[in-house]
Amino acid sequence: MMKKRFTVKLKEHVSGGILKIVVDTETGVNYLITSGLGLSGMTPLLDKDGKIVID
């Protein structure tokens, strides 16, 4: 069985939209995905120092 490339780490419903944190299982990079908030997008999740969050 093939391993999934991306896994959902967190999913929250916020003000009529959805926020997800998705992890790339090959690189460990965390991404923030938004949908249903008028705009949809995906961006690397950053820590307080502006560095990409990696598991």
Image (cartoon, helix red, strand yellow):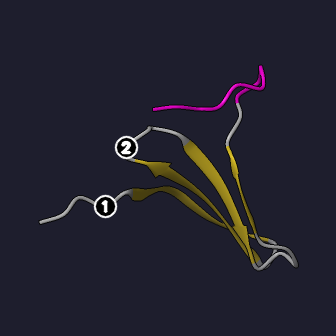
Residue labelled with disc 1: 4
Q: Nearer the viewer, residue 11 or 24?
A: 24
Q: Quadrant of residue 4?
A: bottom left
Instruction: Tell whether label 1 touches label 2 (CB within 8 Å).
Output: no
Q: Nearer the viewer, residue 52 or 34?
A: 52
- Across and down, in percent, residue 3 comes to 23, 58
Location of residue 3 with respect to 55 vertically, above or below: below
Label 1: state its secondary structure.
loop
Quick check: is 26 in the magenta stretch?
no
Farthest residue, direction right: 38
Q: Going from the N terminus, do you reach mark 2 or mark 1 first?
A: 1
- First to last magenta residue range: 47-55
Q: Main secondary structure of the magenta part?
A: loop
Q: Quadrant of residue 50?
A: top right
Total marks drawn? 2
Label annotation for residue 26: 2
Question: How far, Cα to Cα, is label 2 from label 1?
Answer: 9 Å
Label 1 environment density (alpha carbons within 10 Å; few <14, some 14–19, many ≥20):
few
Going by the image, does 2 lie left or right of 10?
A: left
Quick check: is 50 in the magenta stretch?
yes
Q: Residue at x 70, y 25 (%)?
A: 51
Location of residue 21 with respect to 45 vertically, above or below: below
- Across and down, in percent, residue 40 comes to 77, 72
- Across and down, in percent, residue 15 comes to 82, 72
Q: Callout 1, which amino acid?
A: Lys
Q: Callout 2, which amino acid?
A: Glu
Split into 4 quadrants, where in the image is the C terminus? top left
